[in-house]
Image: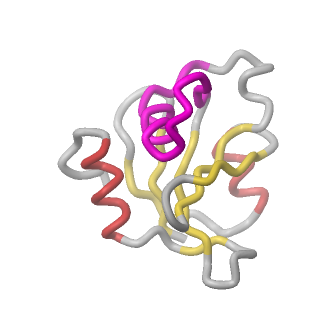
Amino acid sequence: MKVLMIPDEGEPYISKIPNTLQSFQDRVMGFIETVRLKGKRIMIVNEEGKIRDFKLNKNATRLYRQATHDIADRIVGQAFVTYEDDSGEDFTDLPDEDISELLRDLGLEKANV
């Protein structure tokens, strides 16, 4: 499944990952929490990241605030953005158009592949 990885340091990059709970947990280093962004975009974050004092993720926080207009909250630790499938019950590839828009929202031209 194609996602946009958003590390807590460095630039976002496109990655192919298995569409499994274990794969998601490995990438965010623990239990997952879903955060709805614009449309069918879903950000996956660590559910306990704030409690575990993970580092602020500036890029993920920026995308979250742009989508929700919630300026009080923040995203910490590793995160990635995926896409909700048509059933609304699973995840699927993040479309290229959405990747491009997310990168533009972050002021980046292209992702590291």
| Relative to 30, 68 lies left or right | left
Residue nearer the viewer, 112 or 81:
81
Task: Give x and y (percent) for residue 32.
Answer: 76, 46
Q: How many marks?
A: 0
Q: Quadrant where the N terminus lies? A: bottom right
> Taking 53 as reference, is 74 above or below it?
below
Question: Is 57 contained in the magenta span?
Answer: yes
State which quadrant residue 101 falls in.
bottom left
Question: Is 26 contained in the magenta span?
Answer: no
State which quadrant residue 23 falls in.
bottom right
| Residue at the top extreme of this rendering | 53
| Residue at the front extreme of this rendering | 69
| Relative to 99, 19 lies left or right | right
Task: Give x and y (percent) for residue 37.
Answer: 54, 53
Residue nearer the viewer, 27 or 42:
42
Task: Give x and y (percent) for residue 74.
Answer: 58, 26
Residue drawn at 57 percent across, 63 percent down? 17
> Taking 68 as reference, is 95 above or below it?
below
Q: Quadrant where the C terminus lies? A: bottom left
Residue drawn at 43 percent across, 41 percent down? 66
Residue drawn at 56 percent across, 33 percent down? 70
Residue drawn at 51 percent across, 27 percent down? 57
The segment highlighted magenta reads 55-76
Task: Give x and y (percent) for residue 19.
Answer: 67, 69
> Taking 25 as reference, is 83 above or below it?
below
